[in-house]
Amino acid sequence: MKINHLLKKIVLTTSLLLSGVAIASDWTPSGPITLKIGFGPGGATDVIGRVIASAIETNNGWDVIVENKPGGGGVAMLSGLARDKADGTKIGLGVTMATLMNIATRGDSLPFNLDSFDYIGTVVTSPLAVIARADAPFNTFAEFIEQSKANGGYLVGFDGGPQKLIINAINADTGADIVTVSHKSGSEQIQSLLGGQIQAGFGAGAHIEYLKSGDLKMLAVATNVRQPYSPETSSLIEQGFNYSLNPYFYLTAPKGLPENVKAALSAALEEALKSEAVIELIENTMKTEAQNLGPAGTEAELKNSLAMMTKLVADSK
Amino acid sequence: MTLERLQTVILILGMLFLYFVIMPGQIDHIENARIVPATVPTISIWIIIIAAVFQLFSTKVSVKFNPTLCLRAAIFAIFVITSITIMTRFGFEYGAPILALGVMLGIGERRLHWLFLGSTVIPISVWLLVENVLDRVLM
Amino acid sequence: MTDFSVILAGFSDALTLTNMLYVIAGVIVGQFVGAMPGIGPVMTMAIAVPFTFVLNPLPAIGLLIGINKGGLVGGAIPAILINTPGTPDAAATAIDGHPLSKKGKPLKALKMALYSSVTGDTFSDIVLITVAAPLAVIALKMGPVEVFALMVFAFSLISGLIGASVTRGIIATALGLLAATVGLDPEHSTPRFLFGFYDLYDGFPIAAVAIGTLAFAEIIRRLISMTGEIRPAVNFPKDQPREDKRISFKEYWSCKFVLLRGALIGTGIGAVPGMGSTAAAFMSYASTKQSSAQPEKFGKGDIRGIAATESANSSVAGADMMPLLTLGLPGSASSAMLIGAFLIQGIQPGPLLFESQGQLVYGLFGAMLMANLCNFIIGLFGLRIWAKLITAPESLIFSAAMVFCVAGVYLATGGIFGVYIMLIFALIGLVMTALNYPVVVFIIAFFLAPRFELALGQSAAILRGDPLRLVNHPVALVLFGMSVFAVYWLNIRKKNNKPKQPKESKSEPEFNENLQPEEA
């Protein structure tokens, strides 16, 4: 037992007892809870995980230890988590996209699949959209496709396998001859757009500021529903391309979590997402609001997304 | 054959093995793409092979082999790996002092106060700082 | 153009006591961790980022910038004193710094490093402050094709400049490229060379590779060659004449062109995302040596060698902020941490930043200049302490350094896996050194490789596989031409230099000479 965790526990328990506030829950963890983050230290996901952990510590009086397990956008973290004990003391924070793509393309070589986990809830979804320069001669993705065909294939940026899949699937369906150009981040795609190196790209939040400044515009949202900051922009599905990507940040645990533990953890997450620090942080980093689908909703969302990903993989060939 | 030639030959054989035996199983084969996952590995391996073949015939660099140093290096390596295994089993606070103590004794340090400082005070301070002040996990 | 009142308001924001305290704290921590082999400023920043969320933007960024800049000074300390760079970019500083230290003049070497570092850093900060905005416009025109050409140029310079022979330089470069292909490929996101280890999805962790090859390998190498009596890590006479402990203004001024060249190289390289300070330090060192009238003096404790590397690697830090602030692109691992800190504050670096947050940007510039001053003053005091500490026995210094490496890599990579990777790369570093392959070339190529591969894929897409389309990219064509010329020119220089150094002509060890095992 580590000294300061013991201390923290004593302080928290006494303060809860003294103030007479007891959180209604029939479960308390047997030891400290380990929250494994599927990304390296210092990035936005790391900080979101740590702030949620400290909100849970304050709200529930549990001791939450944060560990970084970077690798493949969550694949390394999940392959470790799948082997952990399902007693609620090991949970993970991941992002859906990279994991689902790996399950869809090389599921047989991974030590886990969607059924290896129980789902606690989602934190936020990133507002993924297809963007272009404000002065571009097209306003929707459908128009973009038409002009790409007429001009011998436009260049589209991407910064992750799933984004490339969606373009390749649309290429296969429409014969648009789009050429994909790999990037490291959404910000980098914005630079390529502004510099005129590519004609369209994907934005995952960083683009919102540029919509306001009038440098960029949105051709379509890539998520399956419209997004609150730009309700007039229709989705790819609405424009006749039957594909979507919903990058959710979600909390998960090894399969076999007892129902009461799952309920307690889920309630703890819900409560943490209401804390001021978490709200501010998510607004700052993701330019959007926290969104918790709950245990059943998360599982359904992941299953749907995996079906979509499998379809994308098949259609992009 | 000089040691210089020998190491160059080993390098060439190693790269050929990597290219023909290991690479096919470790890199996805993708069609209809200009740059495939194997592009950069293939370029790198062939650059090494060509440069090494050139080196084999033109080399003037002499390399010396020192068996004592190699033996000492091997002993150190085994010891370091053992103490890191101890760290993963029992925790940094047990493995690190063993690592430090072994290294100090290994190079001939016998003065007790230095041994104590190096093998106890420093590793335990690191552990306390990381685990209890910074609240990060160490092993 | 930003309003002058905004600039003034920004600078006066920076000059509050709170900010100053955070910057000072950052610099102290940065110098300290920079001087610890295996820990370093990048990991420290990663740990500090979550804590900065509760701070206001200016002190938050000021603290991180302090750590980063402190680390630039700190990294040179162990490089000079024990030939083990605290940060990768100080690897070149060891070439002349350590011999000077072994001659019994560690304080002289440390001071030259400090002065050069602060000089280079201030130079690039001033460039950043005065011309960042117009440079951003040019940088926006630097597309993937141009970046790819620039990478080719960098590789041709590095593999030709450093190493016992051209073939060894080329082999080390290609090995670095090859090692960097482990993990997901940037075009198709397929895993490569994983061998079933999912921890390798993002490739070999940079911290583990750099610390393994540069620091841990050196520690092991020193340990195995130690026999007999334990000595202090550095020995220097008690009643040393004053000129051996300091750098006179005359000595400093005699390096003015070296410093300027280093600062220019560092600023240029820092302005391009993904090139990095290690490459800058070596390019500056090599070009200083190449253009010197007495190249044989280098590697034996010449203060010009220290001036060249430290001015270059430190000036990268200021220049790194250009792509960060103007384009939102991180040029290095430490600026990636800064981007993270900006984002959690709700500030997005990029072309809009100067308009929307002008006051903050100039506050930040104020904090940077303040950090340089703190670096200088704290450095002057700190160096004395380090010079005292280093008189502890070698057994203590190196065992402690090993413990720091293990703990540092564990924290930076998130697990024991990274520690084993570090051990493997320490072994690779040892073997390469023993066989006379330049380890630094390997590591620089490893650092540059991801950007290289990305730019290759991007260029192929943009040119649609047709090299003839290159005519639309004149800048890239010029850079390709310069690469060919560089290889040719460097070979000529190498041949011309040979007769001057009859002793070394057999193997011409250059950079390897001080990486060879020392006699005990």
Image: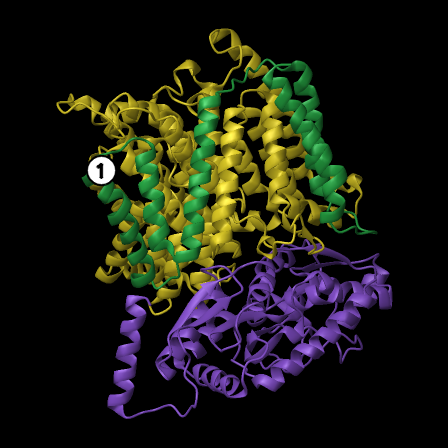
Chain colours: A purple, B green, C yellow
Measuring from the top left, give residue C146's x and y in whole percent: 64, 42
Is C14 situated left or right of B4 in this image?
A: left
Measuring from the top left, give residue A88's x and y in whole percent: 49, 78
Q: Residue at x 64, y 81 (%)?
A: A299
Camera-nearest residue between C12 and B81: B81
The image quarter containing residue A185 is bottom right
Camera-nearest residue between C95 and A188: C95
Mark 1: secondary structure: helix
- Residue identifier under label 1: C389
Is C505 situated left or right of A10 in this image?
A: right
Measuring from the top left, give residue C229's x and y in whole percent: 26, 25
Give the residue type at disc 1.
Leu
Camera-nearest residue between C68 and C145: C68
The N terminus of chain B lies in which quarter of the figure? top right
Residue C140 in the image: above or below residue A258: above
Which chain does the residue under circle 1 lie in?
A: C
Instruction: Tally the marks.
Output: 1
Q: Residue at x 56, y 72 (%)?
A: A212
Is C340 situated left or right of A248 in this image?
A: left
Measuring from the top left, give residue C251's x and y in whole percent: 27, 23
Q: Residue at x 71, y 79 (%)?
A: A304
Residue A25 in the image: above or below residue A228: below
The image quarter containing residue A163 is bottom right
The C terminus of chain B lies in which quarter of the figure? bottom left
Q: Residue at x 48, y 35 (%)?
A: C280
Residue B23 appears anywhere in the view? yes
Residue C347 appears anywhere in the view? no
Which residue is the extreme one toward the left?
C239
The image quarter containing residue A296 is bottom right
Neighbour tally class for label 1: few under 14, some 14-19, many 20 plus, Cα within 10 Å: some
